[in-house]
């Protein structure tokens, strides 16, 4: 059984994460399989629209933290080497992508859904941008990129959970459907895209992506400094606590005085 399944239909490629026993957590094997599938989609002359989905109760719950704990590092391949480049994550694919969100979309799984051009979800799907739980800085950019009000973006950055119906009301999702309508609704969107003049499909996608909100460079620089502000040991402690199903024991700062030396935009 492959951890990544693909299906082709009339110019449409379905990419399905298939690791349901681990809620499609992004382990090294799944990451490699996804990179290969997205490279195929990018390079194909026949495939023009993709549908991205998962098997089981989850779309994707993000990083496989048990693998991270076993490896002793965050990110990378199971063999210690660098991860294979994934054109979906680097934004190289100039073809429309529909996320068909079948369940939990957490952490890195939220980011996978976020990068799609169009999003369809089942009513019971649950979303969480988990960075604040695992890193030294919360998911500050996701609500901004998604065009959400600042208060909602703040809630998202602090790793509160959202249900699909609320995100639909906020405009983050295009459709919310019953379980048995997820793939039919996603295919209907893909088939509509395939009816458009090819140049209109390509050119409109480029224009819409160019218009997406971006975090200004000076704020990205501040984020880089904030990611270094705190005890790096807390990164692995959050993952060990998750893997061991216990409350984490965070120390916050190696030097307690660093609590009062927080970088700011003007510093």
Image (spheres, rainbow, N blue to C red):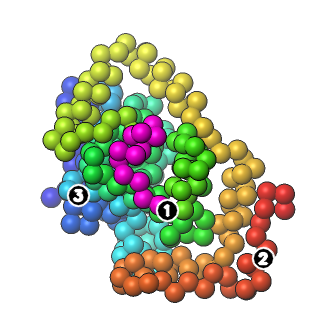
Tag 2 near tag 1, CB within 8 Å: no
Work out which residue is located at the far top of the displayed protein and give it.
197
| Residue lying at 41% horizontally and 20% vertically, measured from the top left | 201
Residue carrying label 3: 57
Question: Is 133 situated left or right of 174 in this image?
Answer: right
**In which quadrant is the N terminus drawn?**
bottom left
Dot 1, how many residues are within 10 Å of its Cα: few (below 14), some (14-19), or many (20+)? many
Dot 3, how many residues are within 10 Å of its Cα: few (below 14), some (14-19), or many (20+)? some
In the drawing, what numbered circle is on residue 159? 1
Nearest the viewer among 76 and 212 is 212
Closer to the chain start, of discs 3 and 2, is 3
| Residue lying at 45% horizontally and 66% vertically, measured from the top left | 76
**In which quadrant is the C terminus drawn?**
bottom right
Q: Is residue 209 above or below residue 19?
A: above
Q: Is residue 103 above or below residue 78?
A: above
Q: Find the distance from the CA under tag 3 to the CA under tag 2.
A: 43 Å
Residue carrying label 2: 260
Closer to the chain start, of discs 2 and 1, is 1
Q: Position of residue 115 (x, y in %)?
A: 45, 43
Question: Is 101 situated left or right of 246 in this image?
Answer: left
Quadrant location of residue 245?
bottom left
Residue 109 is at least partly visible in this image: no
Dot 2, how many residues are within 10 Å of its Cα: few (below 14), some (14-19), or many (20+)? few
Residue 160 is covered by the magenta coloring: yes
Q: Position of residue 262 (x, y in %)?
A: 76, 70
Q: Position of residue 246 (x, y in %)?
A: 39, 85
Q: Which residues are magenta?
A: 159-172
Q: Find the distance from the CA under tag 3 to the CA under tag 1.
A: 20 Å
């Amino acid at each position: 059984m492959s951890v990544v399944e693909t299906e082709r239909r009339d110019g449409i490629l379905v990419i399905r994460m298939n690791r349901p026993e681990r809620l499609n957590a992004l382990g090294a094997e799944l990451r490699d399989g996804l990179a290969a599938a997205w490279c195929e989609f990018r390079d194909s002359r026949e495939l023009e629209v993709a549908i991205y989905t998962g098997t089981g109760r989850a779309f994707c719950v993000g990083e496989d933290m048990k693998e991270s704990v076993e490896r002793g590092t965050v990110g990378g391949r199971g063999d210690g080497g660098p991860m294979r480049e994934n054109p979906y994550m680097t934004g190289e694919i100039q073809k429309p992508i529909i996320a068909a969100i079948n369940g939990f979309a957490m952490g890195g799984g939220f980011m996978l859904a976020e990068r799609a051009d169009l999003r369809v979800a089942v009513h019971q799907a649950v979303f969480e941008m988990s960075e604040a739980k695992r890193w030294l800085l919360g998911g500050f950019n996701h609500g901004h990129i998604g065009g959400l009000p600042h208060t909602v973006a703040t809630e998202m950055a602090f790793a509160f959970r959202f249900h699909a119906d609320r995100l639909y009301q906020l405009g983050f999702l295009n459709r919310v459907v019953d379980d048995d309508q997820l793939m039919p609704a996603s295919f209907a969107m893909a088939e509509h895209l395939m009816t458009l003049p090819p140049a209109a499909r390509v050119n409109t996608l480029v224009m819409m992506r160019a218009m997406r909100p971006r975090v200004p460079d000076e704020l990205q620089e501040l984020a880089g400094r904030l990611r270094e502000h705190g005890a790096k040991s807390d990164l692995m402690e959050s993952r060990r606590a998750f893997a061991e199903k216990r409350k984490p024991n965070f120390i916050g700062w190696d030097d307690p005085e660093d609590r009062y030396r927080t970088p700011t935009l003007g510093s």
